[in-house]
Amino acid sequence: MNDLLKEKAMSWKVRLKKCMDTGRYTQASFAEALNNKYGTSYGQKDVSRWMNTGAKIKNGEVGFPKYDTMILISDFFSVDVGYLTGETDEISFSVEKACSYMGLNGGAIKAIREITQPENDATYMRKDMRESFNKFFSAEGFHNFFERLHDLQLTSILPNQENRVFDNLDSAIDYIRGLEYKGKIARYELNEALVLLVNELYPNPPQLDLNVKD
């Protein structure tokens, strides 16, 4: 293998193992799960060979699985082949594009998708959940809520970034008390912003069109 293929083989081995470990699969149980889902006839030795891609053997090196096998493996773990071979660090190129567009990491995108599940378009519950998300993010009060959340974030990270050196213990204690006060204020303002946002989205009593018989 040339250097490029060696790099991809290393990514393949590391990420395939990660996927298997996450699903708590042994080589044998993974082969069985693939066979049950796709009607294939893989065995533990096949999985062992996949996990040793690029390794030196008597006749050369262990090659990559056939591409159709790689597709089945990636589909089983709900990732792209490109993730397993190191072409993207996200689970799919779609997630990579979403991260680039939104400025969020893959974990945040995944968390949102687990709630909205856009592929389940016909499910009424998921439609309602997506509508809740849409209302929350598009509300006028959301920007204020996020600014207060960011204020709280700053109170938690700035002390470590400042790396202050104090002249005496009293100065250090005063500084800590100041931070505690700022934290309390930030939490209060965040809570108030959330209450305002919720009231904007869901006024009490709710706005209803009531039908009353004459």
Image (cartoon, helix red, strand yellow):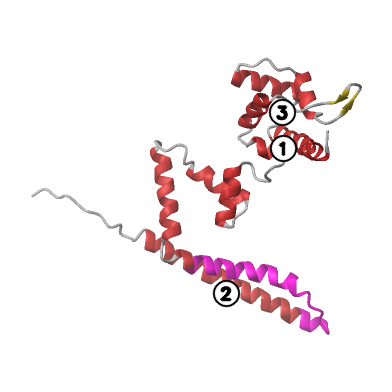
166 in magenta: yes
Q: Which sits earlier in the primary sequence, circle 1 or circle 2? A: 1
Q: What SS does tag 3 mark? A: loop
Instruction: Identify the residue under disc 1.
Output: 85
Q: Are marks 3 and 1 in contact (CB under 8 Å)?
A: no
Classify mark 2: residues with Cα within 10 Å, few (<14), some (14-19) or many (20+).
Answer: some
Q: Which mark is nearer the camera, 3 or 1?
A: 1
Image height check: is 214 above or below 188? above
What is the quadrant of the N terminus in the image? top right
Identify the residue at horizontal 70%, vertical 35% (top origin).
19
Identify the residue at horizontal 42%, vertical 59% (top origin).
138
Q: Residue 109, how many percent across, how many down?
A: 57, 49
| In-image side of 55 versus 171 (left or right) | right
Identify the residue at horizontal 64%, vertical 16% (top origin).
40
Q: Which sits earlier in the primary sequence, circle 3 or circle 1? A: 3
**Foreground residue, 104 or 194?**
104
Q: Residue 22, how many percent across, how many down?
A: 70, 36
**Amino acid at pointer 1:** Thr
Image height check: is 145 above or below 164? above
Task: Provide the residue span drawn in magenta.
Answer: 144-172
Instruction: Identify the residue under disc 3.
Output: 25
17 in magenta: no
Q: Residue 181, how many percent across, how many down?
A: 63, 76
Q: How many marks?
A: 3
Using the numbered discs, state the Cα–Cα distance from disc 3 to disc 1 in whole angstroms.
20 Å
Q: What SS does tag 2 mark? A: helix
